[in-house]
Amino acid sequence: MAGVSLKNVVKRFGSIEVVHGASLEVEEGEFIVFVGPSGCGKSTLLRMIAGLEDISGGEIAIGGVAVNDVEPADRGIAMVFQSYALYPHMTVERNLSFGLRMNGNDKADTARRVAKAAQILRIEELLDRRPAQLSGGQRQRVAIGRAIVRDPQVFLFDEPLSNLDAELRVQMRVEIARLHAELGVTMIYVTHDQVEAMTLADRIVVLRAGRIEQIGKPLDLYDDPANQFVASFVGSPKMNFMAAEVASIEDGRVTVALVNQGSARLTVPAENGFAVGDRLTVGLRPEHFGREGEGDCDLSIRVDMAEHLGSTSYIHANTTSAEQLVIEREESRSEIGMEHLTVSIPAAKAYLFDASGARLR
Amino acid sequence: MRMRTRAAYGFLAPYLLIFATFWVWPIIYSFYLSFLATRIQPWSFNPTVTWGRLVVDPAFLNALKNTLIILVIQVPVMIALATVLAVLLNSQLLKARGIMRFAFFAPVVVGEAAYAAVFRLMFNADFGVINKLIGSIGLSPVAWLGDPTAAMALIIIAVTWRWVGYNAIIIISGLQAIPQDVYEAATLDRVSKPRQFFFITLPLLKPIILFCVVLSVIGTMQLFAEPFLITNRGGPGQATETLGLFLYRQGFTVLNFGYASAVAYTIAALAVLISLANLWLGRSAR
Amino acid sequence: MRSKSSSTLRRSIALHAVLVPLAIVWLFPIWMMVVFSTMPENAIFSPNIHLIPSDRFWENFLILQADTDFLRTIFVSVVVALVYTVLSVLLTSMAGWALARYSFAGKGLVLLIILGTLTLPYFVVVIPQFIMVARDFGLANTWFALIVPPLFNSLGVLFMRQSFSMMPSELFDAARVEGVREWRIFLFVGMPLARPTLAALSIILFLASWNNYLWPLLINNRPDMMTAPVALGSLIGLTKVSWGGIMVGAVLLTAPMIAVFILLQRHFIAGIAAGAVK
Ligand SMILES: Nc1ncnc2c1ncn2[C@@H]1O[C@H](COP(=O)(O)OP(=O)(O)OP(=O)(O)O)[C@@H](O)[C@H]1O
Ligand SMILES: [Mg+2]
């Protein structure tokens, strides 16, 4: 087992820099998830850890040893690919044992490792089949099995579940969590999926355009996002944003006026970094809207569409200045069919961001 | 990953060695040769007896003229025929598709020596089956190997027979890349089949047809085995002497390597020029 | 109101009215090759038209074998074509693999040179090749001379490169992570996956070598190293020669390729069509 450490890691393809100095310490046995929009460099970062991409700058260490110049096979890692990358012309058994056989591993040991991996993943009956004869979930298991056989110190996953249907995805997610608990090894996992990130991760790394925006425990990211990007990226449905203007500042507190919302004002604790008249953004998660009069200011909205799921309802609405909002409500049957609604904003739950997206607190 | 770069060079090296030795170096060397007088030892720099001789040598000009005549007739005829054949062979209505395709594709596998032998015998003026068939319908026999025009026609017939299927295969692969729904849409728009051919198929096939034209131009510029074997070394007289044959004579009968290299470069330059002209015409017509 | 089925019928009749006669014309030379090879010499040169095979194939073969040791030339041709095909497939696959799956300094240049010189006529290189092999190496009339120089052919490089570059790279990355060496990845993952392309390429290369006429004609003048097409060609030019025998030679040269064509038509056509997809 080993931790992974990234120090100011840079990646350039030709003259284009796609990762701009990423630093990260992954503890031994930790489950780390990389999330971020498409093209932000998640796979690139993972492939650099694997040794499949050259490191243009900075240093990557695994188990305390710098691995910049170490071949992938000698890094003690195993990787599971999005497309499974199973060798189509080999049986499952051959797929699992290919790497060991090619490296002259002892035959009996190879057989033992394959049997063990097959047992852990419950694919013993599939050993004689070819990949084309397997279902998506089975292929995924084999791909993971191929990683287990190597007995690695670090598992790397690049969107391993994204080719599966929703139901299988849930099932495999549970399996991966079980695997992590069972093997106790370090895992680094790339995904697009909020739920995977929130449920699997010990810590989440949020990336944007080749930069790490924030690292933290799932709920910490949710409760205390470092900036507007993380705030909007973590949580589903997304956090709502409304334009505001600084109305007055008194020590340690700022009062903002929601733009175009009449007299709606909020007073929020915040130190400095702004002046009266500055444009800011107020953020509020869907579940934090209150009923009329319950919060610190009221907001009247026009309902576009409401989804009533029984215990919860999602109301999609517009403010008078055409900002899109999503409001989560419990017990809102009484509101079915209403076109206009007044909701309230509790100042204690609101976040403030400046024009560049930085969090003000 | 310096190791992977090393692996890449390792994979490339054996082929590159052969390629450099037997392709790249000869290209350079023959250009150099084309400036040397090679009839007398030691070879000396004297382009007037190579490049200079080209423009005044009637034998070369005759070979050039013959080659261009064959080119101008044979390539368009063959490509047009290949296009029509491709469309017909690709038709859903075709019965016995396997045999039909075999008939046109089989010549592709017949070697030059073998087919030259058959053509030479079939087109024999006195005993050839072609003249016997012509005679049986009451026409007078043709002196295929004795009359200059007939001999040219024979070369053109032979080359077309051999290569039309080859081109049809390439064009069919292009046809099959055209999505079927384009035709379905056209049929719903009441566009007739012949119009579909001219206004949908042909424009979409244009790149691939141009590719065939370029291939054929290069092939025809190098025509050698047919006049060598079928019309008996460019006969009658020098009537079917081609550039390829002329080069063979200069290079390997007379062993005048310098002059032959100048001829080779002329062939290459013409092939490139004519191909580029075709591509250019194809582009501007769009 | 035109009925759909009757117009389809009309088109079908027109189609076959054009294609069937044309197909017969196209098959005619191959058919006549067979007919001639089975006819006695005097029948070939009689004024009658013979369109049906006769029974003198074996006699004609014996005459051919007396004119020139044709079986020996077939043997030479088979050896040359087989060795050439194996070597060429191996060399061009390796080069195609390097160009498809690695990035390295000079890759663009190599590709540029290969593509840029691809359409140059063979005649540009044949004279220096001859001088080099015959005079400088002193290797005329050898297996080396027959087999190695034609290995320059770059068709396989482009063909294999295309095939390899369409394979998902994760497949090879997976092997790499497992510590499989590069040449083993090539041999045990890349090559097996390229099997259809390899089949097509092998057929095309074998055919090219089998039918190759000019180079063996130039580089060899020893009877026991003569290839079959060259031997056949040399007979055509002679005045006193058995045409029945020559036709047997033509049949022996052609029949195996026709058989390959029929058996492996799909690969064959793929091989030729691939020339166009670049
Ligand atoms: N081989 C390459 N050459 C040039 N640019 C590349 C290469 N691979 C990736 N990139 C670029 O690097 C950036 C990051 O790509 P990467 O694949 O890491 O994104 P990602 O976060 O994994 O995206 P996704 O979620 O879509 O998988 C992208 O802008 C991509 O275009
Ligand atoms: Mg990715």
Image: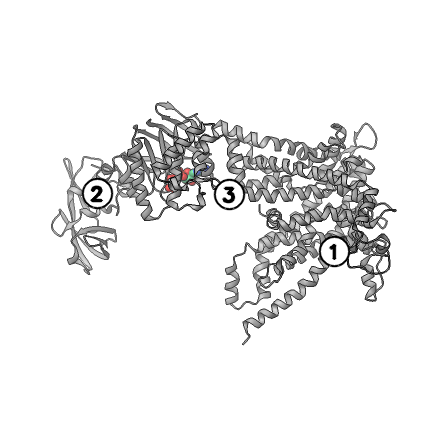
Residue at 70%, 53% in the rendered image = B75
Residue B173, placed above or below residue A271: below
Please give the name of the residue rendered at 47% of the width and 36% of the height, measured from the top-left corner.
C172
Secondary structure under tag 3 reads loop
Q: Residues within 10 Å of mark 3 (few under 14, many from 20)?
A: few
Q: Earlier in the sequence, mark 3 or mark 1?
A: 1
Mark 3 and mark 2 in contact (Cβ < 8 Å)? Answer: no
- Residue extending furthest top? A65
Q: How crowded is the residue under tag 1: few (<14 C-alpha within 10 Å), some, or many (20+)?
A: some
Residue at mark 1: C31
Mark on residue C112?
Answer: none
Residue C167 on image: x %, y %: 49, 41
Assign a secondary structure to mark 1: helix
Chain for disc number 2: A
Residue B159, image x, y percentages: 73, 52
* Residue type marked 2: Gly
User: Which residue matches tag 2?
Assistant: A277
Q: Nearer the viewer, mark 1 or mark 2?
A: 1
The residue that label 3 is drawn on is C166
Picture coordinates of residue C260, whole percent (x, y): 65, 47
Chain to which the residue tagged by mark 3 belongs: C
Marks 1/2 same chain: no
Residue A270 visible somewhere in the drawing: yes
